[in-house]
Image (cartoon, rainbow, N blue to C red):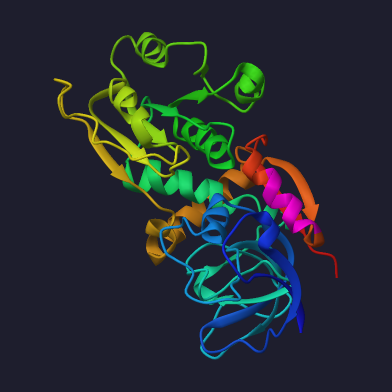
Amino acid sequence: MTRTVLFHELGGPEVLRLEDAPVGEPGPGEVRIRVDAIGLNRAEVLFRSGHYIEPVRRFPARLGSEAAGVVEAVGEGVTGLRPGQAVSTVQTFSQNDYGVYAERAIVPAAAVLHRPEGVGPVEGAAVWMPYVTAYGALVEVGGMRPGDTVVLNAASSSVGLAAIRVADRIGAVPIAVTRTAAKREALLKEGAAEVVVGESEDVVERVLAATGGRGAEFVFDAVAGPGVTDLARIVAGDGTILVYGALSGEPTPYPMIGLGMPPVNMRTYTMLETTTRPERLRRAAAFVASGLRSGAFRPVVDRTFELDEIVEAHRYLESNAQIGKIVVTVAH
């Protein structure tokens, strides 16, 4: 048995329960890890509350896809992994099938990445999802090149901060958009070329001024909803809006209809487009590991909680007060 976070009904953070549950042995193609730290993601809030892209199939349900720990056992057919290795996990699986909110967890071997030397458990649970999401969208899918401009909303999120550093590493120009001025200095310190405060500045005017009227080659949109019509006005000719989140909770219109605007590309993106394709994941892991070794990349951890504080951790995640990642540590 191992302490595991379960929920027996949909709802707010209060539905989460820390219970003893069997963990068992890994099956073919699976790995059991001792979990030392867990990275929290918006997807878990949506899954827990019944608003995720796939519904909860059965109760009690598990949560979580991003963790760092040590391999304890490997199943039949698993190669390249052995007990005692320091690893991290990335999302390649459904939370209906696996979950890492636990002291020990079984996951598919395809979801396990070697943790680079010098990267501890907290950092190892905070680095992969943000950087693989940003790299996969902007580089693998978008083809971002040196000199391109990328506009990032929800820029103080873990993915937004990673996207700033990915753009810097590529030689692109990151413009961060944040709701209030409270996070302006932090975003500049993290490498944003410019910061636009949405509640007091005209985003369209600022971006067009910063790009000499050209507009941005990419908009990396975590919010979606009606605001995409304004974002479409700052996209350069043949540029792309990449929608990877839906923080607005509102329907998202197709922005070009009736606006008399030149063509703008718009597509959704999920991390699974990178993590479930072995070659893409191999390139992403190499890119992120290279950035970690050079010091160009680093996880930004806002706050840590202990496993028995999981309800409080989810409440904090939903507050949107954080700058960077929330990590839950697991004592053994």
The answer to whether residue 118 is visible is: no
Q: Residue at x 62, y 46 (%)?
A: 292
Q: Quadrant of the C terminus?
A: bottom right
Q: Quadrant of the N terminus?
A: bottom right
- What is the total number of numbered labels drawn onto the structure image? 0
Left or right: 144 in relation to 36? left
Relative height, residue 35 to residue 24 (above, below): above
Q: Position of residue 94 (x, y in %)?
A: 48, 69
Relative height, residue 220 to residue 96 (above, below): above
- Outermost residue on the right side: it is 332
Q: Residue at x 21, y 31 (%)?
A: 264
Q: Quadrant of residue 239?
A: top left
Q: Is residue 311 magenta?
A: yes
- Is 150 in front, or is 290? 150
Q: Position of residue 164 (x, y in %)?
A: 52, 32
- Give the extent of the magenta segment: 309-316
- Is 5 in front, or is 135? 5
Relative height, residue 23 to residue 298 (above, below): below
Q: Residue at x 53, y 36 (%)?
A: 160
Q: Is residue 291 magenta?
A: no
Left or right: 198 in relation to 142? right
The answer to whether residue 63 is visible is: yes
Left or right: 244 in relation to 200? left
Q: Position of residue 194 (x, y in %)?
A: 51, 17
Prevailing secondary structure of the magenta residues: helix
Q: Position of residue 40 (x, y in %)?
A: 64, 53
Q: Quadrant of residue 83?
A: bottom right
Q: Quadrant of residue 274?
A: bottom left
